[in-house]
Image (spheres, rainbow, N blue to C red):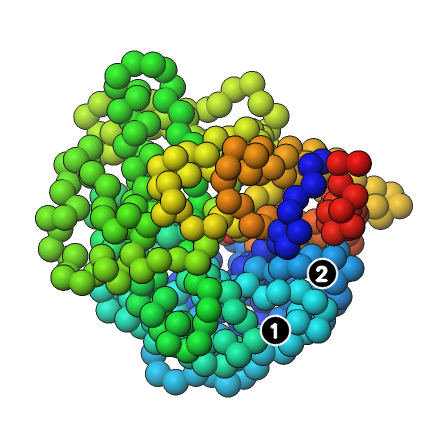
Amino acid sequence: MPQFPPGFAWGVATAAYQIEGAVAEDGRTDSVWDTFCRQPGVIRDGQTGDVAADHYHRWPEDVAMMADLGISAYRFSVGWPRVQPGGTGGPNPAGLDFYDRLTDALLAAGIKPMPTLFHWDLPQPLEDAGGWLSRDTAGRFADYAALAAGRLADRIDTWITLNEPFIVMAFGYALGMHAPGKALMLGALPTAHHQLLGHGLATAALRASGVRRVMLTNNYSPIWPASDSPGDRAAAAAWDTLQNRLFTDPVIAGSYPDLSAFGLDADGLDLIKDGDLACISVPLDGLGVNYYMPTRVSALADAPLPFQMEPIPGYPLTAFGWPVIPAGLTELLVQLRDRYGDRLPPVYITENGCSVADEPAADGSIDDQFRIDYLDGHIRAVAAAMAAGVDVRGYLTWTMMNNFEWSEGYHQRFGLVHVDFETQRRTPKSSFAWYRGLIAAQRNGAAGR
Ligand code: IFM
């Protein structure tokens, strides 16, 4: 393994609804995910995040494990309906207390907290008022950001506004596989602008509260055409626009990409008001990159969306069926640098990981060599991008412990730590020991020797 520069952040990432549980405690009210999970048939086996990994009660044990792992950064998300139930009005002190205690414990363990303000748990009353289809939600998000920073910015210097706004738009509002379960196809596009405006307004609110460093996290994927035909290449370019550019060009370059492949003219959309793009494109201090796999697409004639996904044969598959392609991460990072040049802020890999079936052996141990190989390959891919000149400052794996994987419930196991969801017993897997060893070797300057 190559030696990474001193100060490179090694960490793990999680999200509130996926691990906390305690959905009705201490004043927390419903988010869109609580509502969505109650609908029959939308989540595998009808599972919910009601209890999840019970992190709301077991956080001291979890922070102790993180300290044992040796990480220098922990990306978690603040639960909006915990901190500001209903999404309007004043803060819920008990909700803020939870993140206050967590922050202090992390700092005491020498771990830098990196909160994400929105990892998909929109308060239900805001969804009832239009959710991200409504411009008003952007302003509500900035108010909530100010409440959270008002309590925590004295100890936390780096904040992430949104997690994966593309997935919120695509799965939540266009296809309906995620909360709030709307299937509007291209009618979901306003959620892109409103999330980005929320990012811009929240950035201003965070900085006004004394926050020094603000980031945005997207999930990116190199897009591969299924063939060299002009149709497939155009389809790949269209998907690239939606996933890799729609949420990044406005932030980094101050303008929307060409949306003519969808019969749209972004600049002509009347939802973009004067001053919006200036607000959205205030320079970031870091770009969060989540990477799981490349995407292969072919053309689809006479359809509302001009592409369809194709399988990528010839690679190992995770338990989720996702192809393992570390070189895709190098390709992606180099592409981001080539696309945005000097305007690309320092990059942090804010998620990367895999689902592995992980039943404990008779002696209770869990050998997830598949994950070790996955992490090893992807961390080397980051090193390759850095050798090619991309400024990457950190790597945070997804995820610390098994959790609620959205529509897959508890069936996909992304954690370094196994959780028995009957007893909530935590058991570090072999990947935990491997990652601990890697971090220690990096810290000692012993990697690559
Ligand atoms: O679990 C999710 C996470 O919430 C967002 N990024 C992808 C992960 C794996 O699907």
Give the number of marks.
2
Q: Nearer the viewer, residue 374 or 94?
A: 374
Picture disc at residue 66: 2
- Residue 9 on image: x %, y %: 62, 54
Estimate the x, y position of residue 60 in percent, counting from the top left: 72, 71
In this view, the residue in front, 412 or 226, is 226
Residue 225 shows in this picture: yes
Disc 2 marks a residue whose amino acid type is Met
Image side of residue 82 versus residue 86, left or right: right
Residue underneath mark 1 = 103
Q: Secondary structure at mark 2?
A: helix
Upstream in sequence: badge 1 or badge 2: 2
In the picture, the quarter occupied by the N terminus is: top right
Residue 3, given in percent of the width and then of the height, sits at: 70, 41
What is the three-letter code of the residue carrying label 1? Thr
Badge 2: few (under 14), some or many (20 or more) residues near its Cα, within 10 Å? many
Q: Nearer the viewer, residue 327 or 264?
A: 327
Residue 360: mark in rendering: none
Q: Residue at x 48, y 31 (%)?
A: 331
Q: CA distance from mark 1 to mark 2?
A: 13 Å
Q: Which corner quadrant holds the C terminus?
A: top right
* In-front residue for pair 394/127: 394
Q: Residue at x 58, y 78 (%)?
A: 100
The answer as to whether callout 2 falls within 8 Å of ligand 1 is no
